[in-house]
Amino acid sequence: MLIRWRSPIRGPWLTSVLGLVLLCSLPVVIVTGLLDWVAYGAGQAIPADVGALHLPLLDWPTRPSWLFRLTQGLHVGLGIVLVPVVLAKLWSVIPRLFTALPRNPVKAAERATLLLLVGGILFEIVTGLLNIQYDYVFGFSFYAAHYTGAWVFTAGLVLHVALKLPTMVRGVRSRSFRDELRTPVSRTRPEPAADLVAPEPDPATISRRGALALVGGGALLLAGLTVGQTLDGPLRATALLLPRGRTLPGDFPVNRTFAASRIDPAAVGAGWQLDLGTLQLTREQLAALPQHTAALPIACVEGWSTQQSWAGVRLRDLATLAGVPAPHSALVTSVEEGPFAHATLTGAQVLDPDALLALRVNGADLTPDHGFPARVIVPALPGVHCTKWVRAIGFRA
Amino acid sequence: MTGLRAVGVLACLALGAYAATILVRDPTLHPSIPWMLVWFAGALLLHDLVLFTLYAAVDRALVRLPAVPVPLVNHVRVPLLGAGLTLLVFLPGIIRQGGPVHLGASGLDQAPYLARWLWLVLAMAGASALVWVVRVTRRSAAGG
């Protein structure tokens, strides 16, 4: 043998326990990620054409208003928390990598599918982590790559689970979990000779309970450093190392500053008007319409979210004014130009009583960064579609 | 059983190949497909050959720590893994990569992250050292 594997705790039991944790948690990450595609709405999700590889298309609901906050927060948060579990699982099976390819062609092909499984999850972790930290060093479309990678990984995962589920169940049952929790380093012995168990291990420097505590501790550490990006108030700062743990004093996060939008300040100055197709309204005219206040979250695809108190004109009132009281959809256009300068809302999103063209937030006029003169805010709608610096809304019957 | 296995493997490969057609459907993505493959393979190779070798070698070195009544190994291993894990996950902010997009998105620079990470590492190392001292003190109290 070329390499002498030294760890006395590697073995089917440890691998199976880690596998069980991932089996219970990874489907949540996968499904919440796929839900994000649905939440973007028909024809607006990126990548646009995914064939049959998507969850059933449905009109993304507006209730509960924290729905997208929850699904996307879970996708990103759990995805981060599972990093140490994935790394530990890979550590536990890495001797396999250095064994010869089986001669049986089916088994050899089965081994090759592990490339999809392991390459897939590492690719998803790397692109996901870079995206939420605004590091686009990879240079390709994050959305297309992350979505495709997710399906490649899922293909590998489904086969892996189908083939290994009995092995995992046997492995978990092979030792008493309770006994392991009572076994210190001094009494830690290798598992009986089996696949993954080192034939000539070194003495134990850590118990199995210690190893699990280490992995769990890593997951907890990352959870503690991530959850803050979904909380409001002083706890937000606990996301020490993430962009969304910080805000300018007295402010809440944005995902695009006014400066980055490259909008000419004159375009959102005194001459600004909202174009509803059949009529135009100045900001004064909008402010003179009945105003409604709603506490609604802004939740971003990067997993961060924040709830604020928004005030403005109900979208359904604007639809009525425009002569389309029961719209089928609405096209919102921003003064900004670029890929996210348009968003189509469904009829239900327009008609929700809390769906607003907001003019104010937390009792003050919107700041330029938050979309002055007016922005859309709709319950449970992904933040990127809560268009800022709105120029026009086209209600369609 | 082998037949069933073969069907499973084929279905998995078929689904993987069908997923890849997402990239083929959009001509604007074609130029970046090779680069995506590089990143896919690179993630695998970096993990299996570089990251694993690196942490295994560092862990191996821990065995050479001086033998003392209360072993030092896990008191070094735990904060070291904590430091490595947080560095890996939060690397872009710590090494200030992607600054202009970070600024355009949030209005904030990446200046604080390195110092915050160093403080975090110091806190983990300090806590681990403190626990070690407590264990040593308890042991000598029990022994004496």
Image (tube, rainbow, N blue to C red):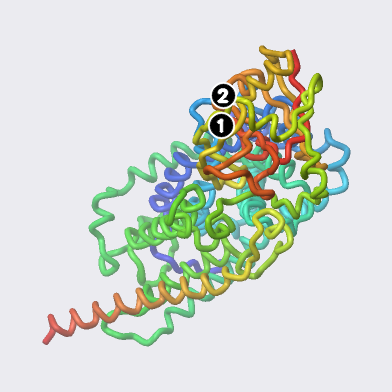
Q: Nearer the viewer, residue B22 or A170?
A: B22
Looking at the image, residue B136 lies above or below residue A206: below
Question: Which label is found at residue A357?
Answer: none
Q: Nearer the viewer, residue A120 or A33?
A: A33
* Number of dots carrying numbers: 2
The location of residue A258, given as percent across then percent down, is 72, 51
The quarter holding residue A169 reads top left
Q: Residue at x 54, y 60 (%)?
A: A249
Determine which residue is flagged by label 2. A61
Q: Residue at x 73, y 40 (%)?
A: A389
Quadrant containing the C terminus of chain A is top right
Q: Is residue A30 left or right of residue A127?
A: left
Q: Nearer the viewer, residue B106 or A121?
A: B106
Q: Residues within 10 Å of mark 2 (few under 14, many from 20)?
A: some
The location of residue B77, given as percent across then percent down, is 42, 72
Quadrant containing the N terminus of chain A is bottom right
Q: Is residue A246 left or right of residue A15?
A: right
Say what secondary structure mark 1 lies in.
Answer: loop
Residue A251 shows in this picture = yes
Determine which residue is flagged by label 1. A380
Q: Are marks 2 and 1 in contact (CB under 8 Å)?
A: yes
Chain where mark 1 sits: A
Q: Nearer the viewer, residue A271 or A188?
A: A271
Q: Amino acid at mark 2?
A: Pro
The quarter holding residue A271 reads top right
How far, Cα to Cα, is label 2 from label 1?
Answer: 7 Å
Say what secondary structure mark 2 lies in.
Answer: loop
- Looking at the rendered structure, whether the residues under marks 2 and 1 are on a common chain is answered as yes
Looking at the image, residue A309 lies above or below residue A240: above
